[in-house]
Amino acid sequence: MSCPGGIIIFKNSPKSYKELPLRVAELGTVHRVELSGVLGGLFRVIQFTQDDAHIYCTEEQIEKELKDVVNLTNSFYVKFGLNLDHIELSTRPEKRIGSEEMWDKSEKALEEVLKKLKVKYKINKGDGAFYGPKIDFHLKDSLGRAWQCGTVQLDFSMPERFEIEYTDKNNEKKRPVMIHNAIYGSLERFTGILLESTSGRLPTWLAHVQIRVLSFTDRNLKYSEKILKELQKEIPNLRIDSDFSQTTVPAKVKEAELMRVPYIIVLGDKEEKEKSLAVRVRGNSKIESFKIDAFVKKIKKEIEERS
């Protein structure tokens, strides 16, 4: 876990109530000991990367911060087009820290937020973290298996044990509440679910190569190079490459398809004469003709809107 590191950051300087809520996040490497029989590629690994976030807030700020985090988590999954299998509210485990009163307060706060947001959820008794209850988001992979990815955990115990404090408006020392949050959970697992659910056909804004330019013959090489440079100039940070090899066009197209490139541009004599682009869109054998300005506008919109 990387939570103690977040607490050290909080304790680095005196804190006032005016600085709360304080939100700290990191992409941290974490480890867990797994039996060899349960390892499964990207889905279960011994070392993984976690998008770990910690929110330090007052008790009065708990409800708003929890609502914001739950809504943010849901918006991520919608943007990626992933299927949410179910949400769980995991309650106090047998081995835990903190008083019963603290656990009662934490579990009630999480449940009230879910009810106010009108979110359907299951109770998962005894599966909370040792320091507090949590809301877990389970995503479904292409085989219908549910994997726990996102989590929101409410924690009164760690601030007490690590003796972190802030000064309230009456100049008195108070303990902040700690909210642990991860949206991807394990970046490796999330990537696995995303690749499976899309069959590797990632949306344009996310694809490793967004456009590939192919030349029909050597005659069209100069025009192809010109188009390549023009697209790089017109669309900042565009991930574009080319295939100007001597192989046949069907072979080049097949290779680009296997690499799941969203847009394949083929440039021949006709395109050079008409100053146009012949574009094959992902997974579609139909060729569409574009003027370069219209194509640039389309790609920019897809990337900016993350559609």
Image (cartoon, rainbow, N blue to C red):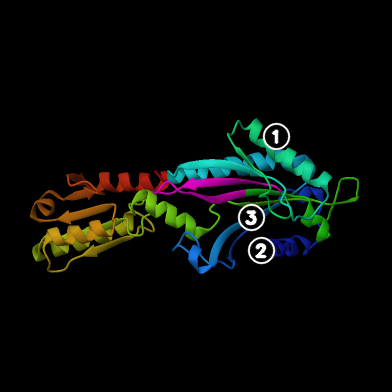
Of residues 152 and 290, which is closer to you in this image?
A: 152
Type of amino acid under label 3: Ala
Measured as percent of width and height from the top left, residue 195 is found at 39, 54
Magenta-colored stretch includes residue 139: yes
Q: Amino acid at mark 1?
A: Glu
- Kindly give the residue lying farthest to the front in the view shown: 37
- Where residue 288 appears, as percent x and y from the top left, is 18, 44
Mark 2 or 3 closer to N-term? 2
The span picked out in magenta is: 133-151
Along the line of sight, the residue nearer the viewer: 247 or 277 = 247
Specify the quadrant that holds the C terminus. top left
Front in this rendered view, residue 86 or 57: 86
Asked if marks 1 and 3 touch (Cβ < 8 Å), the reply is: no
Q: Nearer the viewer, mark 1 or mark 3?
A: 1
Look at mark 3 in the image and give the residue it sits on.
53
Q: Helix, strand or loop at disc 2?
A: loop
- Disc 3 crowd rating (10 Å Cα; few below 14, some 14-19, many 20+) is many
In-image side of 36 versus 226 (left or right): right
Q: Residue 254, position in %: x, y?
A: 19, 58
Magenta residue check for 142: yes
Horizontal placement of 119 versus 217: left or right? right
From mark 1 to mark 3, how far is it between C-alphas? 22 Å
Q: Amino acid at mark 2?
A: Ser
Please, what secondary structure does the residue beneath circle 1 have? Answer: helix
Instruction: State yes or no: discs 2 and 3 in contact (Cβ < 8 Å).
Output: no
Identify the residue at horizontal 49%, vertical 42% (top origin): 84
Dot 2 alpha-carbon crowd within 10 angstroms: few under 14, some 14 to 19, many 20 or more: some
- Disc number for residue 2: 2
Residue, disc 1: 112
